[in-house]
Amino acid sequence: ANMKATSDALEEAAKGRTPSEMSRPTTKSRAGFMEAQGAGMHVLMTAETAIEMGVPMYGIVALTNTATDKEGRSVPAPGQGILTTARETRGVVPQRLLDFGWRRRQLEQERANIARWVQAEHEYLQDELAQFTAAAQPADKDAYTQQRLAEIKAGARRKESAALDTFGQGFYRNNASIAP
């Protein structure tokens, strides 16, 4: 009380402040800490037990771990920290995405497919230009060609990006069975 480290609720109320306005630690008019009391509890149990007891479930804890690097003498992997949390879900057969050679082959195959797609689009463009000329349309043939070539290039970039997302260094993203 002598240090005036805590705010006086009666003084704050006399200044016209409601209880929700009394705790304002970042203002110039703050008057110390606002004392409060409260308690909370979370009960963790297995889903089986919760179902048997008929208690409401508000969430599921999928994984718990500790990363207490350099804290105490029971560190499981010194220097690894949170990396000790990584897990791999093992199936009947190994994850193909974890095989560098397989991913490289898949990426090369996707790139070959993209090259074939670009080739086919260029051929379609030639057909379009032939029809364009035959129909004697008043539109600008060069502008049309440039626009279509830009569309083909953008499409090839999107396909390359998708292939890299799937088989490149970020292959593990959006795959819950592979931990980063």
Image: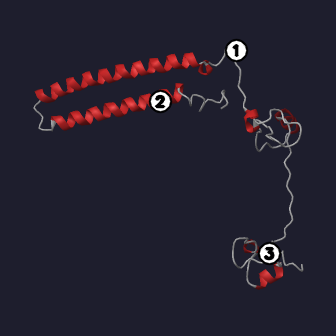
- The residue mark sitting in front, 1 or 3, is 3
Tags 1 and 3 in contact by the CB under 8 Å rule? no
The vertical placement of 74 against 94, above or below, is: below
What distance separates the C-alpha of mark 1 from that of mark 3? Answer: 61 Å
Picture layout, residue 12 above or below residue 61: below
| Amino acid bearing label 3 | Gly
Image position of 123 (left or right of 167): left
The residue located at (36%, 34%) in the rendering is 154
Q: What amino acid type should be assigned to the residue bearing mark 2?
A: Ala
Q: Position of residue 122 (x, y in %)?
A: 27, 24
Where is mark 1, residue-wise?
92
N-term-proximal mark, 1 vs 3 = 3
Q: Residues within 10 Å of mark 2 (few under 14, many from 20)?
A: few
Q: Residues within 10 Å of mark 1 (few under 14, many from 20)?
A: few
Q: Which residue is mark 2?
A: 162
Mark 1 residue type: Val
Q: Are marks 1 and 2 in contact (CB under 8 Å)?
A: no
Q: Secondary structure at mark 3?
A: loop
Name the residue located 84 percent from the left edge and 78 percent from the top edge.
4
Q: Is residue 140 left or right of residue 100?
A: left
For residue 32, which numbered disc appears in the image?
Answer: 3
The percent position of residue 86, horizontal first and vertical second, equals 72, 31
Q: Secondary structure at mark 1?
A: loop
For the residues labelled 1 and 2, the Cα–Cα distance comes to: 28 Å
Cα–Cα span, label 3 and label 2: 55 Å
Q: Are marks 3 and 2 in contact (CB under 8 Å)?
A: no
Q: In the picture provided, is 100 more to the left or to the right than 117?
A: right
Res 102 quadrant in image = top right
Q: Residues within 10 Å of mark 3 (few under 14, many from 20)?
A: some
Q: Which mark is residue 129?
A: none
The quarter of the picture where the C terminus appears is top right
